[in-house]
Amino acid sequence: MRKAPKQARSRATIDAILDAAAHILGERGWQGLTTNDVAQAAGASIGSLYQYFPNKLALIEAVRRRHFDDVLAVLHAAADRSAPRSARIAALVDGMIAVHSRHATAHRVLLEECPRGETERQMHDRFDIECRHAYEALFKVNVPDFVGDTKLGAQVLAGALAGAVHEAARQGQLASPELRRELAWLVDRYLSKRRSAPKRVV
């Protein structure tokens, strides 16, 4: 972004622009996205859009950054020591479903079609590190007496949950109550089974 918004009205305008960009991206893909269409859909002038985003790549980087921030917020909530374990698991599952339900069709385009500049690659690298640390913190809070490789345990949980949620988004299943129950069961059982180091398979 060219500058950070300081007033509530400016932040609302940026949110509207990012929502419009994600919606159009999901419907038309990267090639079908134009800044003029985004501004029109957001109810903003093209001048207002360019005041914050110099081009459509910067605009999409902001959409992706907002998604990253939302994911990290969910992970931090799921590591809240003051909440009961059941509430932490619910925060993780419900939060991930909610985050990926927001413009669900745009996620595939972000992953598969949108180009990435150097700034975007650096942002993605930072997110990977922060996400890994957040899952490790979540794992330690929910399995305090774990004996073994905490980093690996957190990695497996992260991969399983992300894979299931992303596939559900592709299949249009994120609103399914059954999906929610399955994900909650997966997380609960995995964390419950990890209170001691797994037996080595010979």
Image (tube, rainbow, N blue to C red):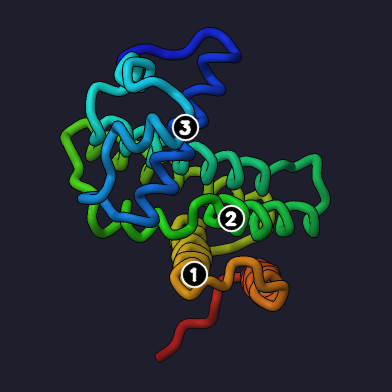
Q: CA distance from mark 2 to mark 3?
A: 26 Å
Q: Report the front residue among 162 and 117.
A: 117
Tally the numbered discs. Answer: 3
Helix, strand or loop at label 2? It is helix
How far apart, in angstroms, are the residues tagged by discs 1 and 2? 12 Å
For marks 1 and 2, the one nearer the N-term is: 2
**Please, what secondary structure does the residue beneath circle 1 have?**
helix
Residue 181 appears in which quarter of the rendering?
bottom right
Q: Residue at x 79, y 53 (%)?
A: 87
Q: Which residue is mark 3?
A: 42
Look at label 2 and name its amino acid: Met
Residue 167 screen position, x and y as percent:
45, 72
> Is the residue under label 3 in contact with that under label 2 (CB below 8 Å)?
no
Can residue 193 be seen in this snapshot?
no
Q: Residue at x 44, y 88 (%)?
A: 201
Q: Amino acid at mark 1?
A: Ala
Q: Secondary structure at mark 3?
A: helix
Query: Callout 1: 10 Å neighbours few (<14), some, many (20+)?
Result: some
- The mark found on residue 96 in the picture is 2
Q: Nearer the viewer, mark 1 or mark 3?
A: 3
Q: Nearer the viewer, mark 1 or mark 2?
A: 2
Q: Which residue is mark 1?
A: 160
Q: Name the amino acid, label 3.
A: Ala
Does residue 120 sit above or below 144 in this rendering? above
Residue 65 location in percent, x, y? Answer: 40, 36
For the residues marked 1 and 3, what is the alpha-carbon distance in whole angstroms?
Answer: 36 Å
Q: Which image quadrant: the N terminus?
A: top left
Along the viewing direction, whichever of 113 and 70 lies nearer the viewer = 113
Residue 21 visible here: yes
